[in-house]
Structure formats: C-alpha cells, structure tokens
Amino acid sequence: SRPDLGRATEIPVDADGGFGGPDGALLPMTDAPAIRVQTTDLAGNLSPPVTVRNVEWTATFGNAEENGTLANPHRLGIIRAAADSLDQNPGPRGSAPTQAQLNAVAALDDAQVEVRSAAAWRRTGTIPTGRARFGMAYDSARDRVVVFGGRWDTGVGFQLFDSVTEQSRLGWLPVLSDTTGPQTRYGLAMVYDPVRGRSVVFGGCTGGNLPTDETWEWDGRSWSQRQANPRPPAVGDPGAAFDVERGRMVVFGGSTTGCFSGTPSVVDDTWVWTGTTWILANPADRPPGRRLPAMVYDEAQRRILMHGGETESGVLGDLWQFDGSTWSPVATSAPRPSARAGHAMAYNPDSGEVVLFGGESSGGNGLNDTWVLEGTTW
C-alpha cells in the first residue's frame, strides 16, 4: 500500500558511472523479484528501464511483523549460521512466518542471505475460449503473447480453432480472422522468430486428425504461407524451439499418424527452419523419436533442451540438449521430473533457469507440478 514500495529515491551517479558507493544502493522493501535501473538527465528526460541481471541482495527482517500486511514474496535461505529458511508469504502463496522464525532471522543481521522469488499464479481478466493442443509464443517486438489454433471437447464433438488471440498488458485481444491464413488445426509447433519479427507455425492436425506439413508465419497483421522443398513430413504434435544463438527454428519428432492415434508412429527427425529453407539435420546421435515433448532454448547455456514426450511404447522422462549440430543426453541427479508428455518449458532470463510445468503421466493423469532446472540440477 506504500507509494514508494519497490522504488528507490534519487541516487547520485559516481564519477566512474556507478552508483550507491561501495555498499550499494539502499532500496525500500520491495515486492519485486527483479531490479530495473532508469536514469534521468538534468532536463528530466528518462531513459528506458534496464533490468539488472546480477543483483546481490542484503536483507534483514529485524522490523518484520508477524502476519504483516506488507507483501514480500522473497524466500530467504540462510547461507551461513542457520539451516532453516523463511518464507514471508501471507495468504495463498504460503503460510506466514511465526514470531519465532522472525526473531531467529532478526538475530542474524550480519548473515548473508540468498533471495529468491516465490512464484504465484494469477488470472488476467477475460480469457479466450477454453482449448487444448494450441500453439503459443511470445512476440517480444510487440510485447504480446500470441495464441493460435487448438481444439475443445464440447461434450458432443470437437471444436477446432483457426483464430489468433493475443494478450497485451491490457488483457486478451481477439484478432480479426484472416481468411487467407491457415485452416483449423491443433497439435502444432509454434515459436517466435525475433530475428525476423514473426511467429512461425509448423505441422499439426486438421479436421479428421490429418497431419499437415504446412509452414505459416504471423507478423501481427497477416498470415503468409511459406512454401519450401524439401520440408519436414506431415506430423502432429512435434516439439519446437527457436535457437537464438543461430537464429533458427528447430523442430523435432512428431507423429505421422495424427494427433490422437492410439499408438503413434513417431519420427526422430531434426529439421531447422532458416526463414526461407528447411534443412534436415542428420546428427549421428539423436534422441528416440517421440511426440508431445517439451522444448526450450536455454539462453544461459546456449543450447536447446528437450524433455520427455511419448513413443509407441509409452512416455519418457529423459533430457536432451542440441547445440545446433549435435544431440547429447543431459545427466541430472535426483530428484527430477517424472516421465510425461504434453508439458511445457520456458526460460526465465532474470534467473537463468528453465521452468517445466504439467503434462500427462503414463496413465494419462494430468500433472500440475512445477520444476526448475539450473544447469544440470532440477
């Protein structure tokens, strides 16, 4: 409720361009897991805010109040002098700390602490029609989340979608239908290409559960179909991610027998889309073929990661990395995510971590667990 919550007062700039002196800058209690710096000149002109990637926090809870109303979503794990941790998250984010916990932390004013954001889900106003097996990508140039396609079980049949819906800071915004765009489909691969400023859609299944080999691009205003030969086979439920290091979309696997076949016929192909041409990569070592894997570009490690998916014999829980030319398995220690398919992964640039959520188990049960990968540690 404080107007200055999470904001610093004016901090003079040192002669060397730094600020805050040797002890850093003093900020009020903040409810944000990231720090952004914005400068102003003598005329009062503000620069664009820049996210600080490497932040060292010094924190004390000497003035914290038990069951206080001031939100602070940081989990403090004591690095020395204590083995316990404090999660000051009243309400649905977690239980409020006890007075004994507060006293214990307050007594450690000289201790070094590690500050991590405690995540929480929140709903963002009006939402699109419910659906599954859709494509979604973040358009960084326009600061919008783009959703395309999908299908919904109405109870008397399936409704397929060919519309584009976008979410901006104002909420979800339906986009006028483009009659020249792709037909209804689900189980598609979709990524955002920041080099060319457009969302790329490949494959998926149209009406009748028929896989397609079409490639489409959405620039925020209109669709364009990209005709290229050679190109990947018609598949449903492939995995895909955009390789930022090399400026290319990478597609792996999929099923040639559709998106809801009882026993999928999966492929183990790796295809690369340059923006004009499809290239079949042919690494000596490659993951087993699969459909419905989760794929993401790991910016910190400059690699594409792929986890899980479904084969003819069941679901997988393996983790692979692709460096642009070679696939190799990634060995991780327990605990680790269970075998699953149809889940999602995303990269968090603020923490340098990969986040995994959901999917279906081997028995077809929906999963709602969240995992974070840093390097080779879940």
Image: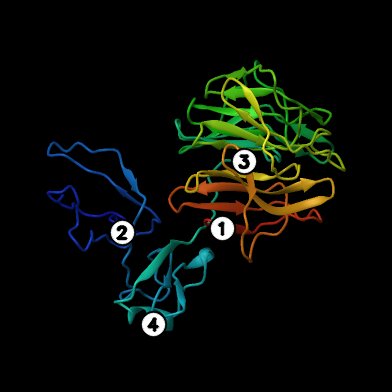
Residue holding disc 3: 326
Structure colour scheme? rainbow
Tell me the element at label 4: helix
User: In front of the other: label 4 or label 3?
Assistant: 3
Q: Quadrant of residue 334?
A: bottom right
CA gap, disc 3 and disc 2: 52 Å
Residue 376 is tagged as: 1
Which one is earlier in the sequence, the residue at label 2 or at label 4? Answer: 2
Residue holding disc 4: 104
* Residue type beneath disc 1: Thr
Mark 1 neighbour density, 10 Å: few (under 14) some (14–19) many (20 or more): few
Which one is earlier in the sequence, the residue at label 3 or at label 1? Answer: 3
Which quarter of the rendering shows the C terminus? Answer: bottom right
CA gap, disc 4 and disc 3: 50 Å
Tell me the element at label 3: loop
* Residue type beneath disc 4: Ala
